[in-house]
Image: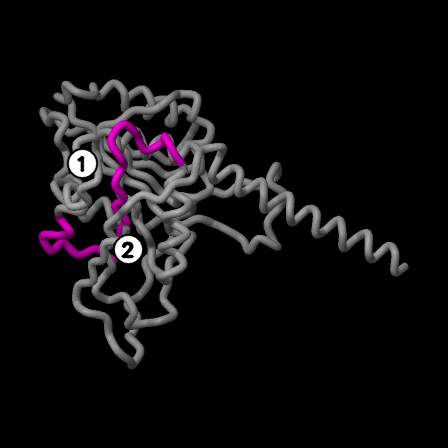
């Protein structure tokens, strides 16, 4: 009997180990792990309730904000509006892609996410990915590589590979594209939207009539952030999850939380913005 228990324990340990390494391989692939610099914006309410977990948005910029000058990430898009005083109830991570690379060249996401999750109280069921132009392409591709990581995504004026439809169909997606875009034609989004609709995906498509490539003002659209908050991953603790080849994690709609009464204690400053290198 003791020997049987020993074999059972060994099998369970082996199964858990296989699941862990399988998930790690899925998340990181074979890409080289790197550390990208990023700007971090924290809601002014952060810390008032020490037990509250916060949703996280990863924002991916376009080609012209690439390089080593981190402040150039604030020139447009979500970081621009946050710097101007816009308030949203998300932790926002805005990494900078180096010149000569794109958002899928290396595994930057996992090192950055691990660092943020270690320092802040994040809700791993509510991680979102949004981006424009090169960031729109990156949003599609990163989500296809890690479909069980993001609760919802919003690629703007980008494009994707139809081979990714099976993975992307598991993620609620809101696509934006200008009908007069001469740099990346709207057909790049239309093809993906049609394929995802045929796969019965949770997909929204906003055609911005007579607008060109610069549609960054959509990052000032509160409707987008309200839509993101309605989605959460239905994740189980790892010991309750089925084996990887049986596991299917899908996003589900969730109702808004009622306002919480802040606990006593020291409050964070009204605006907390940190730059990490």
Relative to 143, 14 lies left or right: right
User: Which residue: 15% across, 52% down?
Assistant: 82
User: Which residue: 25% across, 41% down?
Assistant: 96
- Residue 182 lies, with reference to residue 262, above or below; the image says above
Relative to 103, 221 lies left or right: left
Residue 97 colored in magenta in the image: yes
Relative to 254, 131 lies left or right: left
| Residue 257 place in picture, x, y as percent | 33, 62
Quadrant of the snapshot with the N terminus = bottom right
| Residue 63 place in picture, x, y as percent | 21, 30
Q: Which label sits on residue 91?
A: 2
| Residue 122 place in picture, x, y as percent | 37, 58
Q: Which of 249 and 271 is in front in this view?
A: 271
- Residue 255 lies, with reference to residue 196, above or below; the image says below
To which residue does mark 1 refer? Answer: 65
Look at the numbered discs 2 and 1 and tell me whether their residues touch, using CB distance below 8 Å: no
Answer with the quarter of the image where residue 209 lies: top left
Which span of residues is magenta-colored? 81-106
Q: Decide whether the magenta segment is chiefly helix, strand or loop.
A: loop
> Which type of secondary structure does the marked residue at label 1 adopt?
helix
Q: Is residue 118 visible?
A: yes
């Amino acid at each position: 009997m003791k020997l049987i228990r020993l074999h059972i324990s060994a099998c369970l340990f082996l199964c858990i180990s296989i699941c862990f390494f399988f998930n790690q391989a899925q998340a990181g692939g074979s890409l080289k792990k790197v550390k990208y610099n990023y700007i971090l914006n924290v809601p002014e309410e952060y810390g008032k309730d020490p037990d509250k977990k916060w949703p996280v948005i990863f924002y991916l910029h376009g080609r012209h904000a690439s390089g080593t000058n981190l402040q150039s990430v604030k020139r447009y898009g979500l970081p621009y509006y946050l710097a101007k005083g816009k308030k949203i109830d998300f932790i926002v991570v805005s990494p900078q892609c180096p010149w000569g690379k794109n958002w899928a060249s290396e595994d930057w996401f996992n090192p950055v996410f691990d660092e943020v999750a270690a320092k802040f109280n994040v809700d791993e069921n509510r991680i979102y990915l949004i981006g424009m132009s090169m960031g729109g392409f990156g949003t599609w591709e990163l989500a296809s590589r890690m479909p069980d990581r993001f609760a919802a995504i919003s690629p703007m004026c980008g494009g994707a590979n139809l081979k990714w439809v099976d993975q992307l169909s598991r993620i609620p997606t809101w696509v934006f594209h200008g009908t007069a875009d001469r740099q990346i034609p709207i057909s790049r989004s239309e093809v993906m939207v049609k394929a995802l609709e045929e796969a019965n995906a949770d997909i929204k498509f906003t055609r911005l009539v007579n607008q060109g490539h610069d549609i960054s003002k959509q990052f000032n659209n509160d409707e987008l952030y309200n839509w993101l908050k309605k989605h959460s991953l239905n994740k189980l603790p790892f010991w309750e999850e089925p084996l990887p080849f049986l596991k299917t994690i899908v996003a589900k709609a969730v109702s808004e939380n009622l306002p919480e009464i802040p606990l006593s204690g020291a409050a964070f400053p009204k605006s907390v913005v940190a730059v990490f290198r």
